[in-house]
Image (cartoon, helix red, strand yellow):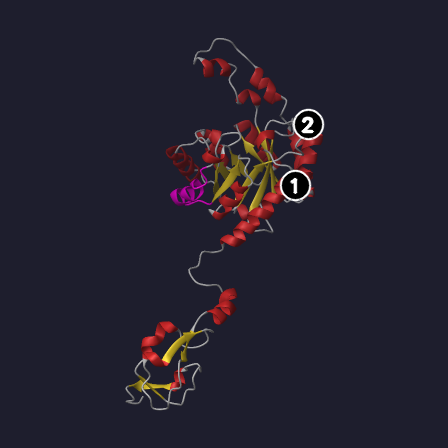
Amino acid sequence: MLESVIQSVRNAIYVAEIGLNHNGDMDTARAMIQRAARAGADAVKFQTFVPELMYSEFTADLLESGVERLRDATMVDFFRGLVFNRDQYRLLQKIAEEEGTVFFSSVFDLDSLNLLEGLGVPLYKLASSEVTNHALIEAVARTGKPAILSTGMAAEDEIGAAVSLFRRSGGGELVLMHCVSLYPTPADQANLARIPALERRYGLATGFSDHTREAVAPVLAAALGARIFEKHFTIDRLHDCPDKEISCTPEEFSGMIRSVETAIEMTGGGAIAYERAEAATARAARRSLFARRAIARGAIIGRDDIVALRPGIGIPPSELESVLGKTSAADIPEGYLIRKEHLRGAGGAGE
């Protein structure tokens, strides 16, 4: 189960998305893991890929005109500078373990999956860009490990196909993540109501991968049922990195955790009943039936004999009809609580 892999002392799981914000620098990556762990992250997530298996050299032409004309290695070269090798990942994994946080990664190709399997990572993330990459989804599922599937830029039928394939292929626990693949995501595009909709549609726990700049977004996501939260992470506001526009600082990450925990506590379990803690308030604030005037022993109790007053420790006003017409079994002074032992059968006929 995902909770057994990523244990949290709180009500939810918090993932610091380091991603590519390390800029390919080991010292920066080390510092980010340490700062994220100390800010409260239950897990730190990287992105693992082979650049040559990520982008075509004709990407620019194909996006512009749909025709291959000029090879351009710009994108591939850019991503080459953000790649760590197996030994570097092993060291980063060890640092995470020393900091008490879980190390895992988004995986984008089969070679990278083999690398991460060699490291023994406990779970995988499948980015929303890979929802239709069925060969990769199947390979991840066959590891038998838990996986997190992001659902931005994916249609309902595509998500359904990916979920079905993962299940058929023997995958472990699968968690969906609501996200919107706009960086940053405008407030009016956040569509947080998609969180419970995804959970209902696929019967899977659904978390929130936050690309907004709005501090309220994860709080609202928590109220809508999210219990896994992922947020891009940076060292500080001055750190220049690929996802700086949507990344939070250690202080902001800690603040997010505090706010989300409060939101979860405030959301409660949804029981349609007042809680035990409210009992004392109810006892003082609700009403009971009292004698509006002195009622003699043997008198038939009528509506004008009764008044509903606080506190609520006796017969509630909702049971008034069960009192009317009964015979008083004792003298009841004005202002006294009417107790069940004061009542006999209707019209004085006896019990």
Q: Is residue 197 magenta?
A: yes
Circle 1: residue type: Glu
Q: Is residue 229 left or right of residue 189?
A: right
* Residue beneath disc 2: 25
Residue 184, placed above or below residue 345: above
Q: Which mark is residue 196?
A: none
Q: Residue at x 60, y 20 (%)?
A: 78
Q: Which mark is residue 251?
A: 1
Name the spot of residue 202 as percent of width and height, x first: 40, 42
Could you tell which of marks 1 and 2 lies nearer the N-terminus? Answer: 2
Look at the image and tell me whether residue 42 can be seen.
no
SS state under label 1: helix
Magenta span: 191-205
Name the spot of residue 313 as percent of width and height, x first: 46, 75
Residue 296, placed above or below residue 92: below
Q: Is residue 326 left or right of residue 171?
A: left
Disc 2: CA contacts within 10 A as few (<14), some (14-19) or many (>=20): some
Q: Is residue 293 left or right of residue 148?
A: left
Q: Is residue 150 magenta?
A: no
Residue 170, placed above or below residue 56: below
